[in-house]
Image: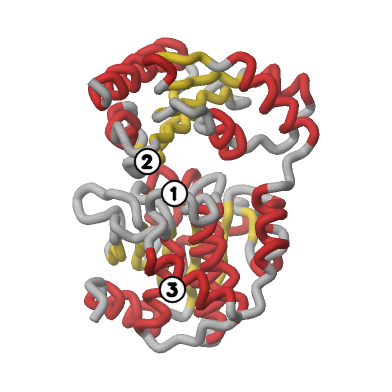
Amino acid sequence: MDALHHAFDALHALLESADSVVIAGHEHADGDAVGAVAALRRHLELLDKRVTVLLDEPLNPRYGFMQFRKHYEVYDPALHDELLRSADAFVMCDLSSRARLGPLGVPAFEGRATTVCIDHHPCDDGGPAEVNVLDATATATGELVHRYITHVGGNIDRQIAESVFVSLCTDTGWFRYPNTTPDVIQLAADLAKQRLDLPGMYRSIYQSNSAAMLRVLGHVARSMTEECDGRMVWAWVRRDLLDELGVERYEADPILDVLRSGELVETVALFTEQSDGRVAVSLRSRGRPDVNGVARAFGGGGHAFAAGTTLSAATAQEDRRKLVSSLRTATAEAFA
């Protein structure tokens, strides 16, 4: 029996009785968030439920091959706040903090909806929702959605298989990261039997950088800073550089992959200036130290090997220095 069976049963009872369900992922939804919300949406559609998926921005073109591209809406307060307040259930996927919902979190938690959190990140205080389906040992949130659908006897059709595979492959770096377990490989193989175009999915997700993004990659590789005898690397991406190079859609993952590809690199920090002056921070570790602890000290979070936070515009430079110092200390202590 699945260890989450009580949480799954509570979620099932809620969704069975709900007439209107709204699902959302975190801001700037990555592959796991997209895959999780897409799989749950399709499951509820097959049950003839009235379900709406909201994202804070248009779907990343990397996931344009998914059927899900036709089945979501970009959040607009004028169009969706009343829906959020009147829904019977509000489900947030792949985030352990309400803050990561962005603006749509306010009407969602102000309304009458019973709130649900499905997530695989470490979470404080039992979770941010009324019904929490949490497992920090799970490889991806999409895996949890798959386990839920299986638990309640739902049909795993091609759309659901495609969505869950996107969650698995992106959160494991196409099955290269330490969270790639034999069970995950078996699940991926089972999903692939649904006629998934794996080469096409790989090309779309990992080999679709624009020329402008390739130029950013070159700039970061030239300007990165190495510390701790090469075990730590960090880089700063200025907003004016992105504007100068004509980057219309910036993504951190391709840059992080370049930075951590170094032979000696164990920890990576990437700082990216946003248009509003805030600075997005992405942290990665090959196993030591736990970068989640560093991120949490600066108001963020994530996993031991992948975490992040956002620095305020007013204190970004000073906070960057403090965060680099913290990561430097953690890296040095991990390899002392």
Amino acid residing under circle 2: Phe
Q: Residues within 10 Å of mark 2 (few under 14, many from 20)?
A: some
Q: Which residue is drawn at the image coordinates 51% and 14% (left, top)? A: 225
Q: Which residue is drawn at the image coordinates 46% and 12% (left, top)? A: 317
- Tell me which numbered mark, 3 or 1, is placed earlier along the sequence: 3
Secondary structure found at label 3: helix
Left-right relation of 65 to 306 = right
- The reply to whether callout 1 and callout 2 are in contact (CB within 8 Å) is yes
Q: Which residue bears the numbered disc 2?
A: 305
Q: Which residue is drawn at the image coordinates 46% and 16% (left, top)? A: 316
Q: Nearer the viewer, mark 1 or mark 2?
A: 1
Amino acid residing under circle 3: His
In which quadrant will I find the C terminus? top left
Whole-percent x and y of residue 132?
29, 63
Distance in Å between CA atoms under marks 1 and 2:
9 Å
Q: Nearer the viewer, mark 3 or mark 2?
A: 2
Q: Which residue bears the numbered disc 1?
A: 177
Amino acid residing under circle 1: Tyr
Q: Which residue is drawn at the image coordinates 39% and 37% (left, top)? A: 286
Q: Which residue bears the numbered disc 3?
A: 146
